[in-house]
């Protein structure tokens, strides 16, 4: 079994994920960050962790958030364990954050990750681009969370998909509550972020500004002791500030995929 297959096998022993491998050269827009994180990086290992369909179909916001936290934690755990496995084999490897922490400098404003994991999923044959701007998997549709690791090991690369799982039903575009999907895979990022990240950084800065500019103590207390403050605190505590999954949940691709046998995963 070659090293690439060893990595995939070890990942699936931890959880039934999909794993794809692409060359670092396949992500030219991430070259600067790849070089900074790991000089000599050759291979990018992308891990696709599926959501629970039932959770994303729930009308309860916090059930969906909880499942999202679980998925990202799963990606992080597998990424770190694989990176350490590669180190034990004599290679350099680092796990890369799936979404946070990331560069919050004025140059990026926290809007650009070190690795475009959606592009990595496409380049490594796990998915293709959907009309919702997400990586759509034949197995799970867009109901996944992505992350992974980079390494100096020259691993066997996976081929890109030679078909698109997207069936052009347009449900994601028509269902988007923010009207952020433009129908051709492009997303109005501001419209999307204002809705998805309802209690993210922008909401925090607005709250701070509201408190700072209040004219009296009563108004300040009203702003501070509010639902908005409590929800922001919860988002900060959990590290999850997503508030919309519509374009993931309505997509018919991959629905009904047999659930993973979690009992066998330890």
Image (tube, rainbow, N blue to C red):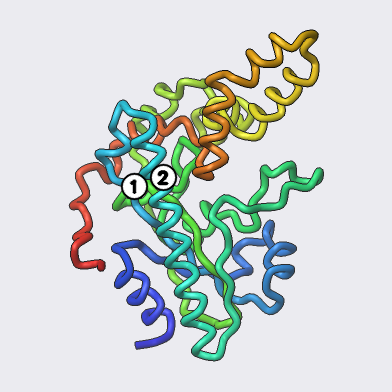
> Is residue 120 shown above or below 105?
below
The vertical placement of 134 against 157, above or below, is: above
Q: Please tell me whether mark 2 sits on a helix, a strand or a loop.
A: helix
Spatial separation of the CA atoms under disc 1 and disc 2: 7 Å
Q: Residue furthest front?
A: 217
Query: Which residue matches tag 1?
Result: 51
Residue at point 47% right, 69% down? 21
**Callouts 1 and 2 close, C-beta under 8 Å:** yes
Q: Residues within 10 Å of mark 1 (few under 14, many from 20)?
A: many
Earlier-in-chain disc, 1 versus 2: 1
Q: Is residue 100 left or right of residue 132?
A: right
Residue count near mark 2 (Cα–Cα under 10 Å), binned few <14, some 14–19, many ≥20: many
Residues 236 and 147: in front is: 236
Q: Position of residue 19 (x, y in %)?
A: 40, 66
Nearer the observer: mark 1 or 2; the answer is: 2
Q: Quadrant of residue 152?
A: bottom right
Q: Is 131 placed above or below 158 here? A: above
* In this rendering, position of residue 196 left or right of residue 25: left
Image position of 123 with respect to 42: above or below: above
* Along the viewing direction, whichever of 23 and 102 lies nearer the viewer: 102
Counting from the top left corner in percent of width and height, residue 46 is at 47, 63
Q: Which residue is mark 2?
A: 68
At x 34%, y 34%, the residue is: 249
Residue at screen point 36% across, 51% down: 137
Q: Position of residue 220 (x, y in %)?
A: 71, 15
Quarter the C terminus occupies: bottom left
Q: In what element is the residue under mark 1?
A: loop
């Amino acid at each position: 079994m070659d090293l690439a297959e060893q990595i995939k096998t070890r990942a699936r022993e931890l959880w039934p994920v999909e794993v794809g491998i692409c060359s670092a050269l396949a992500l030219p827009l991430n070259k600067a960050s790849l070089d900074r994180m790991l000089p000599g990086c050759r291979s990018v290992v992308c891990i696709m962790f599926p959501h629970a369909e039932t959770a994303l179909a729930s009308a309860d916001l916090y059930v969906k958030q909880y499942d999202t936290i679980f998925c990202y934690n799963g990606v992080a755990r597998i990424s770190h364990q694989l990176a350490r496995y590669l180190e034990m084999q004599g290679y350099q490897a680092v796990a890369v954050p799936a979404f946070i922490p990331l560069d919050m400098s004025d140059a990026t404003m926290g809007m650009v990750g070190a690795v475009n994991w959606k592009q990595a999923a496409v380049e490594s044959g796990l998915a293709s681009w959907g009309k919702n701007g997400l990586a759509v998997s034949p197995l799970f549709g867009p109901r996944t969370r992505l992350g992974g690791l980079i390494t100096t090991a020259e691993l066997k690369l996976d081929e890109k998909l030679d078909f698109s799982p997207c069936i052009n039903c347009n449900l994601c575009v028509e269902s988007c509550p923010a009207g952020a999907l433009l129908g051709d895979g492009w997303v109005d990022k501001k419209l999307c972020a204002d809705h998805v990240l309802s209690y993210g950084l922008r909401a925090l800065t607005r709250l701070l500004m509201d408190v700072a500019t209040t004219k009296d103590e009563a108004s300040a207390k009203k702003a501070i002791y509010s639902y908005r403050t409590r929800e922001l605190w919860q988002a900060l505590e959990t590290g999850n500030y997503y508030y919309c999954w519509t374009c993931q949940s309505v997509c018919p691709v991959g629905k009904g995929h047999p659930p993973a046998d979690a009992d066998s995963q330890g």
